[in-house]
Amino acid sequence: MAIHLITGAGSGIGAAVAARLAERGDELWLLARDANRATVLRKRYPGANTLIGDLAAPDRLSWALGQQTQPVRLDSLLHIAGVVDLGAIGDLGTKVWNSTLAVNLVAPAELTRLFLPTLRVSQGQVVFVNSTSGLATSAEWGVYSASKSGLKAVADALRAEEHGNGVRVTSVYPSRTATPMQARVHAQEGREYDAAAWIDPESVATAIVTALDLPRDAEITDLTVRPGR
């Protein structure tokens, strides 16, 4: 039985991955931003463990997690949570920059630092669910893309640093996926949202689980998931 720590398990891709891993009997540790959210997650995934830590406040993660029981073994750390606010560079101030970078970049880096000793012992895997916006950007997407480009750099550096310790590092780059975040993006864009037009979260979950289940003689480093229609 594998043990996984997942952020973003409440909806979208994170929920699809958590459900898939729970169904096959793996042990889940789910990060929640507060106690109420933790209760919701435990009800949704019976038998799952929860940790409370706010990704919007990465400076406090070390203290918060230090007050709680943590997994003694960890086979994977799955960074799936994220936020997005669209807008022109000339219009968005430091509040949006700081909040986006905190959740999408600094918090994943800090969580990885905190759990890396445990991952080294089990020769586990770190999965960063990035975005195709981390590979190329367009107007109004600068802040989000900057956070995801930075996340790619974190993953690439971590892979080079931890290869000798047996820790695998995978970046997954989904294109637009039918999630609550995508619905919010469409609202920001002023467009009608049709979930059927975008990738099903279950398809991205399949890609992530495939990377986790790959035999140890190989490693998926970068995986782009694009619409098939």
Image (spheres, helix red, strand yellow):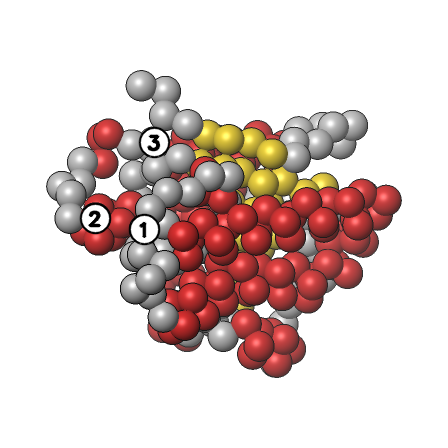
| Mark identifier at residue 189 | 2
Report the Cα–Cα distance between label 1 and label 2.
Answer: 9 Å
Kindly identify the amino acid type of the residue bearing the numbered disc 2. Glu
Residue ID at (56%, 31%): 223
Which residue position holds label 3? 199
SS for dot 2:
helix
Q: Are marks 1 and 2 in contact (CB under 8 Å)?
A: yes
Kindly identify the amino acid type of the residue bearing the numbered disc 1. Glu
Nearer mark to the viewer, of 3 and 1: 1
Q: Is residue 90 above or below residue 153?
A: below
Precedes in sequence: disc 1 or disc 2: 1
The tally of labels here is: 3
Precedes in sequence: disc 3 or disc 1: 1
Which residue position holds label 1? 140
- Image coordinates for residue 26, horizontal then vertical, percent: 57, 45
> Label 2: how many residues lie within 10 Å, few (<14), some (14-19) or many (20+)?
few
> Label 3: how many residues lie within 10 Å, few (<14), some (14-19) or many (20+)?
many
SS for dot 3:
loop
